[in-house]
Image: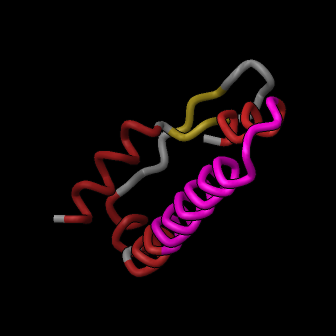
Amino acid sequence: MYARYCELRADGRSRRGRATCSKEIEDYNRYDCRSTHKLRDWLIKHRDRIRACHRWARTPVADGTAVEDTDELARTLMRVRR
């Protein structure tokens, strides 16, 4: 949607069309922020249960750091959710 907004602006299209795109971007961002906040709250609420049933599997990568096994984490979160 942002790319569309930029196209409208670059083409000198009406302010009304740009305002519509801008409003859609704003609405999406509001929804996304609220959803992320609810996920954060849920994770905090269940933090101890998640830690208790999940051994953090870590996979080394080329630069020596490690990344979490996201498949294992997803399975753990599903167990906690039940």
61 versus 37 height, above or below: above
Left or right, 78 with reference to 2? left
**Count of numbered marks:** 0
Q: Nearer the viewer, residue 2 or 72?
A: 2
Q: Nearer the viewer, residue 72 or 36?
A: 36
Residue at point 29%, 46% (across, down): 75
Q: Where does the image place residue 14, in percent across and percent down from the top left?
A: 73, 46
Left or right, 17 with reference to 43? right
Residue at point 68%, 23% (across, down): 61
Residue at point 45%, 39% (across, down): 70
Q: Residue furthest top?
A: 62
Residue at point 46%, 78% (across, down): 41
Q: Nearer the viewer, residue 63 or 29?
A: 29
Q: Where does the image place residue 68, in percent across and percent down from the top left?
A: 54, 40
Magenta stretch encompasses residue 13: yes
Per the picture, the main secondary structure of the magenta-coloured stretch is helix
22 versus 36 height, above or below: above
Left or right, 1 with reference to 8? left
Region in magenta: 11-37
Q: Residue furthest left?
A: 82
Q: Where does the image place residue 48, in percent across and percent down from the top left?
A: 41, 75
Q: What colour-coding does the image apply? A: secondary structure
23 versus 66 height, above or below: below
